[in-house]
Every structure is written in structure tokens, then in C-alpha cells.
């Protein structure tokens, strides 16, 4: 029994002794192509980081700008929208601290007020168009009168001006009358008839004024320059009326020496002040 136990012990296989790992074992190396591929696929992170940074900066700037002038920008926005839609603006809307407008309850505008505004705008547009037509018509009329008066315009005996009152024609008294008289010269009749022909086609009012110099006159016909200037203006008005200008469109006034063009300090200036003025009134005066 004892020998048998010894034999069994002696024949048992010993356990193997574990071996120690080598300390300086070389690491496994990956192929060069695999490392290059991984480095190439990671580059998008750089671009993405730059994009996020720029986007954040953009929103910071937008937020700071909106906070700087919320009220002014919102009023400008509402005014532009109101102008486009032709609706009343709301400059007094409150603006909250966050920058969003707090829209109050708005009472709808009455239909009648909106219609009145539309009618007013249309009326303004119509008036503007009428004004352009009036100005064009007055320009045309001034050219026609200058054409028929061309012969005495060249002699410096007539001046034509366009003013706010209308077309003003100043005709020298020496072209129309003898000194101290109110009877028209025969050679002036043709020119005045041509003027009457032009004016008879129009509908504007015609004002005729007689003017003298400051030298007093005292005759049986004309006790003063008032009578002389009035009768001279009446003589021109009568000729126009006889040649087609309706009487209801004519008005006559004598102003004597009270409205001179130049100071009455020389014979030349006095000659210029002795005149008959024909004013074709602008339709604006009749309408106002």
C-alpha cells in the first residue's frame, strides 16, 4: 500500500510554470493607408466648428441691433406697411422689454372714414391732373398771343409775361392812342382784332386796365388821369367785345398813375408807364 501511493505520486504530471511576458514587446502597427483615411475623415469637424462660431456671432449681432432701437424700427415698419395698405399707423403701440410689440386691441375703422380717405385721394389726383392741363393750356395761349402780336413786340411796344394771375400783356399807349386821347389808332385795330380772335376761343376772364403817367391832365373830356385811363381801357374792351369776346368775360378798370412799372423820373419811363394792360386770368383764380 505504501509503495503504491509513492508510485502514484511520482507518476502525476507536474503543473506547467507560467512564463513572463516580454516587457519590450513591439506594438502592432497599422497599415499606412488606414491612418491616412482616418485623418482625412476627421477634417469636417474643423469646418463645422467654424460654422457654429460664425452662426453664433451672427445671432449675437442681430440680437444687439434689435435691442438698440426696437421702438424706432418697429414704428418705421408699421409706417411703411400702413403707407402701402393706406391704413392708419399706430405709433403709440407699447413695446415689451424682450423686443416684441404688444399689439393692443384695435377698433376697426368705420367704412365711411375709409371711403372718405379714398375719395380725398382721388380728388387730389384729379386736381393735380387739372392743374397740369391748365398750365399747358396757358402756355399754348401765351404762344398764340405772342405770334399775333409779333409785329409790335419787335418794336418793343408790347410785353407778354406769365404770372400767377395769368397771362399779362402790356401794350404801350403810344401804339394805341394819340397823346391825351382815348380813340384807338387805325393801325392798332388789326392787331387788337387778332388778339380778340384768339381770346374768343377761350373761356377765361379778361381784365383790361388803363394806366397813365404822373403828369396831370385837365380837359373837357378828361378832368383827370382817372377818366383818361378808364376810357382808354373801355375802348380796348369794346373792340374785343365787337370781335367775338363775350361781354360777361370782360372787366375794365382805370388806375391812373397809381401802378407804374418804372419811376416817373424821365420821359422814357413815363412813356413805359402809359399803357393798357390785358390780363387773361388763369382758371385757378376763377376756381379759388
Image (cartoon, rainbow, N blue to C red):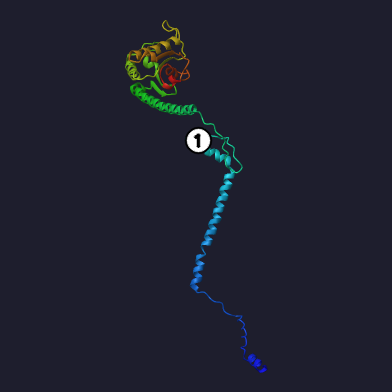
As drawn, which residue projects farthest toward the top? 220
Residue 228 falls in which quadrant of the image? top left
* Mark 1 nearby-residue class (10 Å; few <14, some 14–19, many ≥20): some
Q: Above or below — where is 108 with respect to 159?
A: below
Residue at 53%, 56% (x, y): give it: 51
Q: Above or below — where is 255 with respect to 7?
A: above
Q: Is residue 32 visible?
A: yes
Q: Where is residue 194 in the image (x, y as percent from the top left)?
A: 32, 19
Q: Where is residue 70 in the image (x, y as percent from the top left)?
A: 58, 42
Point out the image quarter for the N terminus.
Answer: bottom right
Local SS, label 1: helix
Nearest the viewer among 189 and 143 is 143
Residue at 40%, 10% (x, y): give it: 231
Nearest the viewer among 247 and 39 is 39
77 left or right of 254 in image? right
Nearest the viewer among 29 and 64 is 29
Q: Above or below — where is 214 with respect to 10?
A: above
Circle 1 is placed at which residue position? 82
134 left or right of 25 in image? left
As drawn, which residue projects farthest toward the front? 1
Q: Where is residue 148 in the image (x, y as percent from the top left)?
A: 33, 22
Residue at 56%, 50% (x, y): give it: 59
Q: Above or below — where is 281 with respect to 31?
A: above
Amino acid at each position: 500500500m505504501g509503495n503504491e501511493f509513492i508510485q502514484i505520486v511520482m507518476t502525476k504530471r507536474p503543473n506547467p510554470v507560467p512564463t513572463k511576458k516580454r516587457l519590450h514587446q513591439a506594438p502592432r502597427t497599422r497599415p499606412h493607408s488606414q491612418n491616412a483615411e482616418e485623418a482625412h475623415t476627421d477634417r469636417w469637424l474643423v469646418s463645422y466648428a467654424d460654422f457654429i462660431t460664425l452662426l453664433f456671432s451672427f445671432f449675437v449681432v442681430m440680437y444687439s441691433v434689435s435691442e438698440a432701437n426696437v421702438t424706432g424700427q418697429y414704428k418705421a415698419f408699421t409706417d411703411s406697411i400702413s403707407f402701402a395698405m393706406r391704413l392708419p399707423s399706430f405709433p403709440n403701440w407699447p413695446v415689451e422689454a424682450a423686443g416684441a410689440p404688444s399689439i393692443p386691441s384695435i377698433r376697426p375703422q368705420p367704412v365711411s372714414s375709409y371711403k372718405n380717405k379714398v375719395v380725398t385721394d382721388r380728388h387730389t389726383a384729379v386736381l393735380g391732373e387739372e392743374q397740369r392741363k391748365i398750365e399747358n393750356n396757358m402756355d399754348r395761349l401765351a404762344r398764340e398771343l405772342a405770334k399775333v402780336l409779333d409785329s409790335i413786340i419787335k418794336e418793343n411796344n408790347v410785353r407778354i409775361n406769365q404770372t400767377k394771375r395769368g397771362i399779362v400783356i402790356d401794350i404801350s399807349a403810344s401804339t394805341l392812342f394819340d397823346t391825351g386821347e382815348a380813340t384807338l389808332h387805325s393801325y392798332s385795330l388789326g392787331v387788337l382784332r387778332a388778339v380778340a380772335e384768339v381770346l374768343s376761343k377761350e373761356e377765361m376772364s379778361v381784365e383790361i386796365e388803363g394806366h397813365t403817367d404822373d403828369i396831370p391832365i385837365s380837359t373837357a373830356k378828361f378832368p383827370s388821369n382817372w377818366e383818361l385811363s378808364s376810357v382808354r381801357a373801355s375802348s380796348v374792351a369794346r373792340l374785343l367785345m365787337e370781335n367775338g369776346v363775350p361781354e360777361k368775360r370782360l372787366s375794365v378798370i382805370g388806375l391812373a398813375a397809381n401802378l407804374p412799372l418804372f419811376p416817373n423820373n424821365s420821359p422814357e419811363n413815363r412813356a413805359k408807364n402809359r399803357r393798357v394792360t390785358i390780363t387773361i386770368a388763369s382758371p385757378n383764380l376763377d376756381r379759388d
